[in-house]
Amino acid sequence: MSRRRHRWLLLLPFVWQIALVPFVNDVAWRPLGLPFPMVWQMAGVLFASAIIAIVHRLDKRAEAQ
């Protein structure tokens, strides 16, 4: 069980998408001409993918031990 503690990292994308949205909605900056919340969502997809990759590697490492 203690070898699977890293799976809590999978909550970070949810925090990114849900908890931080109220702070992002009022940002007027428009990178590349896109509304900032749209850019935030696209960055969230990349962030979630990175977190999943990290957890996958940590799972493999935990299985090898």
Image: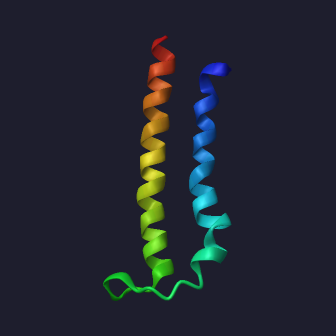
Q: Residue at x 50, y 27 (%)?
A: 59
Q: Residue at x 62, y 73 (%)?
A: 21
Q: Position of residue 16 (x, y in %)?
A: 58, 61
Does residue 56 sit above or below 45 in this rendering? above
Q: Residue at x 42, y 41 (%)?
A: 53
Look at the image and name its color scheme. Answer: rainbow
Which residue of the protein is positioned furthest toward the top in this rendering?
A: 65
Q: Position of residue 61 (x, y in %)?
A: 45, 21
Does residue 49 sit above or below 7 in this rendering? below
Q: Position of residue 13 (x, y in %)?
A: 56, 55
How many numbered marks appear?
0
Q: Quadrant of the N terminus?
A: top right
Q: Is residue 60 left or right of residue 24?
A: left
Q: Is residue 12 left or right of residue 47?
A: right
Residue 18 location, quadrant: bottom right
Q: Nearer the viewer, residue 49 or 34?
A: 34
Q: Residue at x 45, y 13 (%)?
A: 64
Residue 46 location, quadrant: bottom left
Does residue 52 sit above or below 18 in this rendering? above
